[in-house]
Image (cartoon, grey):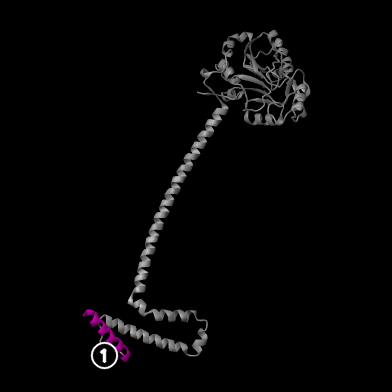
Amino acid sequence: MTFISYGQNAEDVILWRALKHINNGYYIDVGANDPEDDSITKAFYDRGWHGINIEPLAQHYACLQEQRPRDLNLKLAAGDYNGELTLFDMPSVRGWATSEPTVADHYRQQGLDVVESRVPVRRLDSLCAEFAVTDIHFLKIDVEGFETEVVRGMDFQQWRPWILIIEATRPNSQDSQYQQWEPMLLDNDYQYAYSDGLNRYYVAKEHKELATALAMQPNVFDGYKFIGYERAEQGLKRAQQQVQDLDARLQASQQQVQDLDARLQASQQQVQQVNKQLLAVMNSLSWRITKPLRQLNYRLRSSQAWQYQLSHGLVKQLFGRIKRRIKLIRHQSLLLRGKTDSTQLSPHTAAIYAKLQKAIKERTN
């Protein structure tokens, strides 16, 4: 199983190599900051470990409370006395808060805003006594230049963390500063094991067998992956899934377009058939014969002077003409079907009949 590293410098990979045989271990994280980003304890917490997180900044403490319910999260700073101290925070840069005034002055000179606040401060040994701490498998200290005071506030004879990992350079610098606090560790039977360029690792004398596991950089045999890579891969997978979903939706849309196109073509064919039928009707003899009737009907329907024409008897005249036209059409229809003779027609119709008969004979001959 791939080990996901959340540490800034893969510190958790090195620690896990040495301590992975411990089930449900215990840690103390001084300067815990965010519960996930650059966290040395996140990977251990995910594997059942728990411990104490010391974090004085309100926003990080709130996140720890939310995401680390098994841990004891303390909103305070660690130092070499119990009381209060001034905390200097740089809101624009996560993880640069410090209790060291000289570090805060350095950041001011760089043009950064520095926010001061008063926070509680406790010695580590008093916290261990208060919360009845027994075995501590590793103690991590990262307090941006205040490491000496934290080390001085711990009784390393009574409480013996198996491994110590302490930031050993000046904040945001490669200049080392471990010379101030390392002698106190060596005097308490801790031996130096490894430096990763940012932190120094120490092993308690009674657990010196762990030094071998700490004495090399994270490498391919550790089978680890940075959380940043993991997030990128997960983001890529989500993006690929979104592309697949969009492609499926596109194919469905294309099928809908094809279906609509087929329906449109069918509708166009129906329109063409209707147009043919309409053209056939309009070219038929009956349509041409009844043209005057349609015109008359339209005029009657659209006339705004209908009442006036009715009062003057014009409608009666029109209906008389309609009746005569209908009678003529009826006789002509009978004539064309051979079901009448000229003796049944009016003189006017008989004359038309004679002309039609003559035209038919001429076409036949």
Residue 138 part of the magenta segment: no
The residue lying toward the viewer, choosing from 263 and 285, is 285
Give x and y (percent) for residue 232. 55, 31
> Residue at 36% of width from left, 84% of height from top?
326
Please give the range of residues in magenta: 346-365
The residue lying toward the viewer, choosing from 59 and 181, is 181
- Which quarter of the picture shows residue 150? top right
Question: The C terminus appears in which quarter of the rendering?
Answer: bottom left
Extreme left residue here? 365
- Which quarter of the picture shows residue 290? bottom left
Tally the marks: 1
Q: Is residue 264 left or right of residue 53?
A: left
Looking at the picture, which amino acid does disc 1 mark?
Thr
> Residue at 43% of width from left, 87% of height from top?
318
Give x and y (percent) for residue 42. 60, 25
> Residue at 42% of width from left, 54% of height from top?
260
Q: Mark 1: which secondary structure?
A: helix
> Residue at 52% of width from left, 34% of height from top?
236
The residue lying toward the viewer, choosing from 23 and 348, is 348
Whether residue 164 appears in this view of the structure is no
Give x and y (percent) for residue 74. 70, 25
Q: Which residue is disc 1 drawn over?
A: 343
- Which quarter of the picture shows residue 175? top right
Extreme bottom residue here? 347
